[in-house]
Image: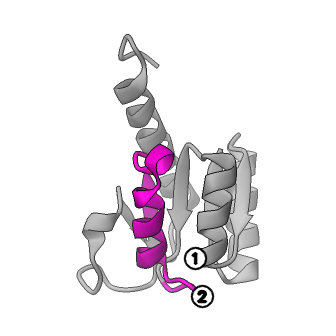
Amino acid sequence: MVLLVEDVTDVRAVLAEILVREGFAVVEASNGHEAVVKARAVRPDAIVMDIALPMLGGIEAARVIRAITNLHDVPIIALTARPVGTFDEHEFDGVLSKPCLPDVLVRRLQAVIVSRRKRYSPSGAT
């Protein structure tokens, strides 16, 4: 399951449709506060987070989520229109620039989810 955090409704809808079409279950949030609440509730396999969010920005939301014991290892991918280097990229497991090609987003999500599963499976297999 992927938690998709994007405040622009149309962008969120398009991204959700792409991810669902590629076989991901998607839970949506429209701001950083909602992202934290939903992350606690659903324990996603990965999070795609916009940086510029209302109520609680993406960087701050990522920090809060990382501080939650059972969520500290959930991969968080930033999806942003901000230029690389203008924010703390170390809070994220990857940064994708908007606009992002659907296959780039899907491949990145698949990679972080597989990597996480390998780290936490007893045999290291998927």
Quarter where residue 92 is shown: bottom left
Horizontal arrangement in the rendering, residue 123 relative to residue 16 (left or right): left
Horizontal arrangement in the rendering, residue 84 relative to residue 70 (left or right): left
**Residue 96, x across and y down, in percent:** 41, 67
CA–CA distance between discs 2 and 1? 6 Å
Whichever of callouts 2 and 1 sits on the residue coming sooner in the sequence is 1
Q: Which residues, given as a range, are shown in magenta? A: 52-77
Q: Residue 16 magenta-drawn?
A: no
**Secondary structure at numbered mark 2:** loop
Quarter where residue 45 is shown: top right
Q: Which amino acid does label 2 sit on?
A: Met
Q: Does residue 107 appear in the picture of this structure?
A: no
Which residue is denoted by mark 2 in the rendering?
55
Q: Which amino acid does label 1 sit on?
A: Gly
**Residue 115, x across and y down, in percent:** 38, 34
| Residue at x 48% of width, y 61% of height | 65
> Answer yes or no: do the residues labelled 2 and 1 have beta carbons within 8 Å?
yes
**Residue 84, x across and y down, in percent:** 28, 79
